[in-house]
Image (cartoon, rainbow, N blue to C red):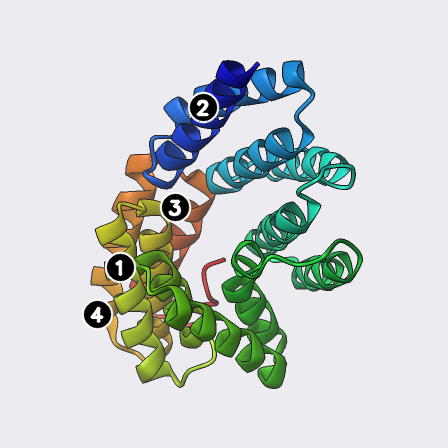
Amino acid sequence: MGARRAQALACCLLGETLLLRGRWDEAAGYLRRSIELHQALGAKSGEALTWQRLGELAIYRGDATAADKCVQRGLALAAEAPMAAHLMGRLYATAALDALEQGNLAAAARAIGAASAAAERYGDCPTCGALLHPVAAEVYARLGDKDRAEKWAQAAERVAGHWESGAWQAMAEVAHAVVAPSEQAVARFVRAAQLFERLGQPFQAARCLAQAGLIHVERGEREEARGRLERALAIFHEIGAPRAAKRVYQALARLRAGTSSAHEVT
């Protein structure tokens, strides 16, 4: 039993690593194997965590239907799992990101609210729940709720200061970028992209480059915009993120047409 639990966890962790590194076909194989092993063991916590990572994978690939199914499976398991306090924040952060990627800010805000309610009911893990911080900051910034956006950005900064890891620092940069004036926002997005690249997380790096590029578009900085957007587009194509690539391609098309009606890449 112990060996099988170790194998199930190892498959989940390896799948997570491959997911973040943009090796998505390999990641999917390990994550699905982890699901099978956790199901055989009746290990709801491990299975819920793996569904959360599969949900992220579906988001990155642009499959909103699959992402929602993964999140719902994970939430159903997490509600009965001994590690619910660690799982709920992760799952609702994934749900919020899924909605944000679809441009559904109302649904993203509902997921953030559900995360807060779950924390009151099941308890809260500060680090697992911190995955929600940059997403929530972006959602509320785009909704025009500056106070809430800044609150979430400050929460991200506190976590980054406590743990001093590159991943938390990168997420804090993203959270601050979405509430910063445009010039500072570009610098923060570029800094976040550099940190994500250093960590070997291409999707997040490209997303930050795209955000910076769109700010350049809005500022009329055509050459800077083109450079950031083309770099982001190349990464999205390389790792197989068609939805994100399409949005960047559309931004480049607007740039060539001489328009600046760009919105943040989500």
Element at badge 1? helix
Callout count: 4
Lower position in the chain sequence, tag 4 or tag 2 = 2
- Which residue is painted at 43% across and 32% down in the image? 13
Lower position in the chain sequence, tag 2 or tag 3 = 2
187 w.r.t. 78: above or below? below
Q: Mark 3 and 4 residues: CB-CB less than 8 Å, in contact?
A: no
Q: Amino acid at mark 4?
A: Glu
The residue labelled by disc 1 is: 195
Q: Whole-percent x and y of residue 34?
A: 53, 22
- Which residue is painted at 42% across and 82% down in the image? 180
Q: Amino acid at mark 3?
A: Ala
Q: Whole-percent x and y of residue 160?
A: 40, 68
Element at badge 3? helix
Point out the frontmost of discs 2 and 3: 2
The residue labelled by disc 3 is: 245
Residue 11, numbered circle: 2
Crowd rating for badge 2 (residues with CA inside 10 Å; few <14, some 14–19, many 20+): many
The residue labelled by disc 4 is: 224
Quote the CA–CA distance across marks 4 and 2. 41 Å
Lower position in the chain sequence, tag 1 or tag 4 = 1
- Which residue is painted at 75% across and 56% down in the image? 118
